[in-house]
Amino acid sequence: MKKILIVDDQQGIRLLLNEVFKKEGYETYLAANGLEALEYTEKIVMDCVLLDMKIPGMDGIEILKRIHKQLPELPVLMMTAYGELDLIKEAESLGAKHYFTKPFDIYEVRDVVNKLLKD
């Protein structure tokens, strides 16, 4: 079973994504902040990370840098409520595979993850 880590400080987003990806047959892990996310990636072999760009404390860019330093092949998909082109470009330059702008289309997120993990 493929494993997805969902990292977002908003509980509603975590729960929504969790429900969608469990129905798709994935094993899901939820993290509310960067430290939780990094603990999961150190202990469990993930197949994909959905990562919010704006998280209090350690932001998404910092989390992305640390994940890619530790696991350069792990696909990370960024989520942002902000249309900040410079942050999106930075995330892509650091290896983010895709990004979604909130409010996102949940079916688009599902389809991108399915395509990424079923290939």
Image: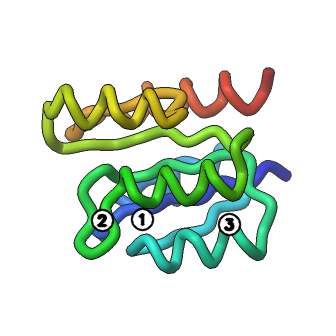
82 left or right, relative to 41: left
Nearer the observer: mark 3 or 2; the answer is: 3
Q: Which disc is residue 41 wearing?
A: 3
Residue 2: x and y in percent read: 79, 49
- Residue 26 visible? The answer is no
Label 3, label 1: how far apart the Cα atoms are: 19 Å
Q: Amino acid at mark 2?
A: Gly
Q: Give the tally of numbered discs.
A: 3
Q: Residue drawn at (80%, 21%), measured in percent from left and top?
A: 119
**Mark 2–mark 1 CB contact (< 8 Å):** yes
Mark 1 crowdedness (10 Å alpha carbons): few <14, some 14-19, many ≥20? some
Secondary element type, mark 1:
helix
Q: Which residue is mark 1?
A: 15
51 left or right, relative to 90: right
44 left or right, relative to 49: right
Label 2, label 1: how far apart the Cα atoms are: 5 Å
Front one among 99 and 14: 99
Q: Which disc is residue 12 wearing?
A: 2
Asked which quadrant contains residue 79, the reply is: top left
Q: How is the image coloured?
A: rainbow
Q: Amino acid at mark 1?
A: Leu
Q: Residue drawn at (24%, 56%), measured in percent from left and top?
A: 54
Q: Amino acid at mark 3?
A: Thr
- Residue 1 visible? The answer is yes
Mark 2 crowdedness (10 Å alpha carbons): few <14, some 14-19, many ≥20? few
